[in-house]
Amino acid sequence: MTGRRRWSTEEILDTAVALLRTSDAESFSVRKLAAALGTDSSSLYRHFRNKTELLRAVADRVLLAAVDSHRPEGDWKQRITALGLRLREAFGEQPQLAAIWGRYGSGGTGSRLVMEEVLQALRTSGLPDQEIPACYHRIVILLAALIASEAGISTITSEEYEQGMEQFRVAVLGADPERFPALAHFARDIRPLGAERRAAFEEILAAHLAHIEARIP
């Protein structure tokens, strides 16, 4: 009689990623993961103490892959921008995982590499050391929020997108000018949330980095 197969941590994470491509963190469960692997939940708890720890490990794999292909170049603003765009691209390939990073964070190697790159870039900026941790924190919050927001839009179906666009056109172009005078005035120039996402990402990040730069002695 053969014993039950023992799955490696990497095999467990591979399967978790595959499940999360078609679901979200709320509907994902260790029980579903165990069923996909053909095992019971107890065997997975030898690798991860709970669902949250497992999800953090999944998010960390995305961070690790993103940083692994990142080559720091340019000044501190260019380095942080390049890293931000690389993270955006990595989570864009697996949008369901972006919200997991924003919600659960990660304490793994990928997370530490992201922290190290941002902190190193900030140290070359000329900021006093005592201001760098707070600046780092705000940069990461901004990146996580922008990436999670974009990922949320990218996961909707084409039908849902068209429905949303129709609602947008009705809400904006059909706005009552007496009740919404500013909206009616700018209606034809207002863009939906899904438009020009990369340009908006870069502009918002650039504006924040310029704000930091203005504080450098």
Image (tube, rainbow, N blue to C red):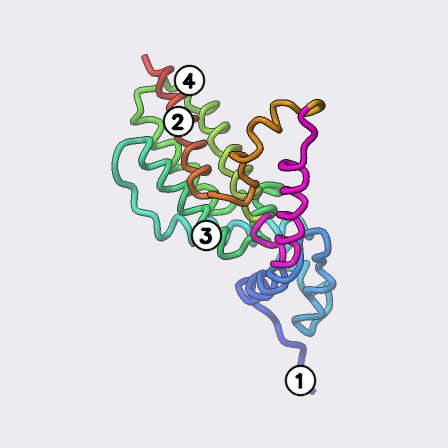
Labelled disc at residue 130: 4
On the rendered image, what quadrant is the C terminus found in?
top left
Q: Are marks 4 and 3 in contact (CB under 8 Å)?
A: no
Query: Where's residue 26, x and y in %?
Result: 72, 51
Q: Earlier in the sequence, mark 4 or mark 3?
A: 3
Query: Where's residue 73, x and y in %?
Result: 26, 40
Decide which of 186, 43 is in the foreground and name it: 186
Q: Which secondary structure is most common in the magenta stretch?
A: helix
From the viewer's perspective, is 71 left or right of 166? Answer: left
The answer for how far apart the CA atoms under marks 2 and 1 are is 59 Å
Residue for badge 3: 90
Query: Can you tell which of label 1 and label 4 is closer to the viewer?
Result: 4
User: What residue is shown at x 60% (from left), y 54% (from top)?
Assistant: 155
The image shows residue 130, relative to residue 47, as above or below, that is: above
The answer for how far apart the CA atoms under marks 3 and 1 are is 40 Å
Q: Earlier in the sequence, mark 1 or mark 4?
A: 1
Query: Where's residue 162, x and y in %?
Result: 63, 53
Labelled disc at residue 209: 2
Decide which of 145, 132 is in the foreground and name it: 145
Query: Where's residue 129, x and y in %?
Result: 38, 20
